[in-house]
Image: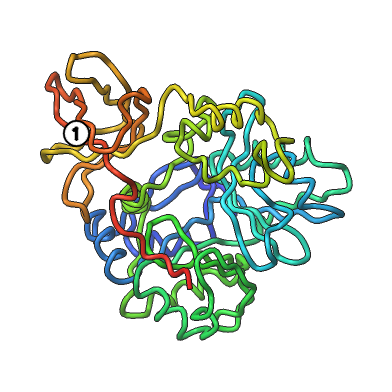
Amino acid sequence: MSASPDNLNTTPLTDLHIELGARMVPFAGYSMPVQFPLGVKGEHLHTRTQAGLFDVSHMGQVKLTGPEVAAALETLVPVDVIDLPEGRQRYALFTNADGGILDDLMITHQGDGLYLVVNAACKAEDIAHLRANLPAEITVTELSDRALVALQGPKAVDVLARFQPAVHDLVFMDNQQLAIDGVDCFVSRSGYTGEDGYEISIPADSADALVRKLLAEPEVEPIGLGARDSLRLEGGLCLYGHDIDTTTTPAEASLIWAVSKARRNDGERPGGFPGAEVILGQIERKDAPRKRVGLLGQGRAPVREGTELFNADGDKIGVVTSGTFGPSVEAPVAMAYVDTAFSAIDNNIFAEVRGKKLPMTVAKMPFVAPGYVRS
């Protein structure tokens, strides 16, 4: 990856994006495509019905190797890493001493070590956090010589299987090293859209040629950051720095499921991660003061990040952290933090937009039925 003239980093696919007519924007220190000629709504709906190809090479890819590496990583995350089977990946959180979330990430057991994918905006801090807090015998290697793409949507399996039939056999959260059109890749059946699909880590020098072949398939369109955001929001998936951050705990963020049973107070390996007392205490007492909830608008106006929320008496009870008009839901969708007393499904609350109080309903997430293939 090189720096562009305006000091933004580029990915191995930047030239291809420009060739395809992408509108490029700064994002997490990178020049990234926000949309292609199909447009954000068209890209969103195409991914829901066909297959969309996303460049996510700005994300951090990291390899951990060394003795007892799973046990070592467990000291930094509240998830069960020791019992993670080879070829499987698991969602995890880096936490701090106050129980806040430093980042969310994916952990894969690759047999010879652990493979992590971390958020672009947190990449440098995460790698520094790993190097500072893991034992000296654990080697932390940033895989900066690899691109990362996501092929998402109900037709993704048909497309990718033309290049490697074994992808049919993967289920949600499987991660295998497979040759795609002769290129050695890490392939996981996962993604950030709520749809079935794959994330594919590719050697950087092979990425452009392989992605061009995928895009040549009739079901596939290139997709930018704009549709990626609306897809993940409809899918009920958090965006770090917006829906979760260092001020939110897993209980507040409705991510209790990301604290493994083995790591809880009644589990086999209780605690032992940063902020354990705060996090496990909130889970046991069920006393998180606020909760992340989904909101469905009753009108058509989108409710954006930062919008304040009120109860029927006019008292402020929360704030929106992500919001848009959902092209698949055909209604405004949002995530927000509200006082726990107002977090029950079907509660009616009000969003203040341009001086008007717009009614919204607390709704179950995800807003669209997930397309994950689990068996």
Whether 170 is drawn above or below 64: the answer is below
Query: Which residue shows up at 61% across the image and 46% down it?
Result: 260
Q: Nearer the viewer, residue 238 or 54?
A: 238
Does any portion of residue 83 appear in the rendered image? Answer: yes
Judging depth in this view, the residue of 248 and 132 nearest the camera is 248
Q: Secondary structure at mark 1?
A: strand
Position in image of residue 128 (x %, y %): 72, 37
Report the residue at 76% width, 52% height from top: 70
- Indicate left or right for 358 with 174 as reference: left
Q: Is residue 19 above or below residue 312?
A: below
Q: In the displayed structure, does residue 194 sit left or right of residue 71?
A: left
Residue 180, how many percent across, how many down? Answer: 56, 79
Residue most toward the front?
Answer: 266
Residue closest to the eye, 263 or 141: 263
How many badges with numbers are in the image?
A: 1
Q: Is residue 2 visible?
A: no
Three-letter amino acid code of the residue under disc 1: Met
Alpha-carbon neighbours of circle 1 within 10 Å: few (<14), some, or many (≥20)? many
Q: Which residue is mark 1?
A: 360
**Percent x, y of residue 15:** 45, 61
What is the quadrant of the N terminus in the image? bottom right
Q: Position of residue 323 (x, y in %)?
A: 28, 38
Which color mode does the image show?
rainbow
Residue 222: image quadrant is bottom left
* Relative vertical location of residue 47 with respect to residue 93 in this rendering, above or below: below
Q: Residue at x 43, y 64 (%)?
A: 16
